[in-house]
Amino acid sequence: MTTMVGSSFFMYLMGVFSFCLGRKHLLLMLLSLEFVVVALFLMLYSYLCLYDWEFYFLMVFLTMSVCEGALGLSVLVLLMRTYGNNYMISFNLLW
């Protein structure tokens, strides 16, 4: 169980690192955020297995992460239709 926690923590750190490096493209940012969500899911699963608790909260967590992914993809589609690319520098919030 400790190797699962260690590997998921490493996955979390690599997801945050790739989020910081891929800040120019919205699609890369969304993919790294989903990677972070998967790592958090694995950490939460191993924590709940360790203490023999219910897994109902995992379903709530997965539901919220799916909603986050759908919202990110809708912003990506809006950005692609409006500006024609997914560069974050072209998305100006002041317009």
Image (cartoon, rainbow, N blue to C red):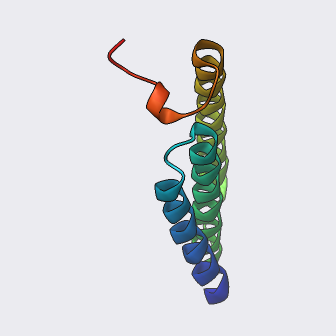
For the C terminus, the image quarter is: top left
User: What is the quadrant of residue 70 in the picture?
Assistant: top right
Nearer to us in this view, 15 or 93: 93
Residue at 65% over, 87% down: 3
Counting labels gives 0
80 w.r.t. 37: above or below? above
Residue pushed farthest left? 94
Residue at 61% over, 17% down: 78
Task: Locate residue 89, reporting x and y percent.
Answer: 45, 33
Task: Locate residue 86, reporting x and y percent.
Answer: 60, 31
Q: Report the side of 88 relative to 41 (left or right).
A: left
Nearer to us in this view, 22 or 5: 22
For the N terminus, the image quarter is: bottom right
The answer to whether residue 51 of the structure is visible from this angle is no
Residue at 40% over, 22% down: 92
The answer to whether residue 22 of the structure is visible from this angle is yes
7 w.r.t. 81: above or below? below
Task: Locate residue 13, reporting x and y percent.
Answer: 51, 70
User: What is the quadrant of residue 80 in the picture?
Assistant: top right
Task: Locate residue 73, reporting x and y percent.
Answer: 66, 30
